[in-house]
Image: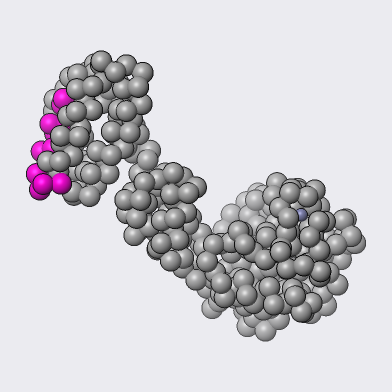
Amino acid sequence: MFRNIIAQNKAKKIITEQIKNNKIPHAYLFIGEDGVGKKKTALEFAKILNCTINDYSKTDIGACGHCAACEMINKDSYPDLHMINFAKQEEMPDGEGEKTKLGIDLIRYMQKYVYMKSAEGKWKIFIIEPAEKLTIDAFNSLLKTLEEPPKHTILILIAKHRETIPTTILSRTQTVFFQPLPKDEIVKYLQQQHSLDEETAAKIAEDAEGSFGKAEYLMLNTQNEYASLWKELTGKKMPAADLLEKSRQVSRDRDTALSILDIITESAMKSFRKEPEKYIDIIEKLSEHKIYLTRNANPNTVLDNLFLYINSKTV
Ligand SMILES: [Zn+2]
């Protein structure tokens, strides 16, 4: 079970054992930093319980991922899966206004469904996120549900830190901790899901603090910054002063300069495939300058030269 959840072996083991032994608590508290797989695990859990092909009481393969129930959960349209979050609060009739807290009205709204019969006849799952943003009133109201939970209903509270949750709630929920992800898992993920080369992936993983979410954020930022760079350099004639300024802004250190060079080279190769004659000199210049960089040339000087050259050659 939970085969598509990366790492988090402890968390997966706890929940898997409970499913196998048919001792599923009615409420969980998933604790861990952003982007480590808490919500993904909660959704997978919902699939395992509701999958119409792989019955969890008979097999431990886990959810099939493609039956009608699994598909609906993937698309967030399963009638017995309820996301209790800021988006839901905003959708409610008097939802607008409060943007920093999840209020009691949201919990009351949820309770309507908690005590309603399940639409699909299996398990009802409520994912409350971020649980630390519930108001005191909302927590107190939630407590009532935790004290008398209907059968085949699971509440999963998701939060960053356990200390932010009232003790009355803690004592009625099963805490499951999610750890920061190992760097090599993040590298693998970036390579497989986003086709990054190992070097770039490793650099991002270094700053990602064990979070896929943060890694993706860093990746997008990096890519956007560099992607627009190639467009700028080849878009229109730029004054030398502007090109040098641009170079100064991005040549923070050797590693950054090398990443920029790699990404520019990637864009240049795309252009080269379309117009080989126009871009051949640039490709040569880029590989030449990469060697300079690895041989300790000043990153700023290298990028100065390249930016001036690319702009003069292409525009
Ligand atoms: Zn399924």
As for residue 299 lying within the magenta part, the answer is: yes
- Magenta residue span: 294-311
User: In the image shown, does 135 or 16 lie closer to the viewer?
Assistant: 16
- For the question of whether residue 244 can be seen, the reply is no
User: In the image shown, does 33 or 198 lie closer to the viewer?
Assistant: 198
Q: Residue at x 46, y 45 (%)?
A: 194
Q: Residue at x 68, y 73 (%)?
A: 16
Residue 112 in which image quadrant: bottom right
Report whether 53 appears left or right of 298: right
Give percent across and percent down for residue 279: 25, 21
Q: Quadrant of the C terminus?
A: top left
Task: Using the image, determine if residue 191 lies above or below residue 176.
Answer: above
Q: How many marks?
A: 0
Residue 273 in which image quadrant: top left
User: In the image shown, does 174 or 69 lie closer to the viewer?
Assistant: 69
Q: Main secondary structure of the magenta part?
A: helix
Task: Using the image, determine if residue 121 lies above or below residue 90.
Answer: below
Task: Using the image, determine if residue 282 lies above or below residue 209.
Answer: above
Give percent across and percent down for residue 219: 40, 47
Report whether 121 appears left or right of 235: right
Task: Using the image, determine if residue 224 lies above or below residue 144.
Answer: above
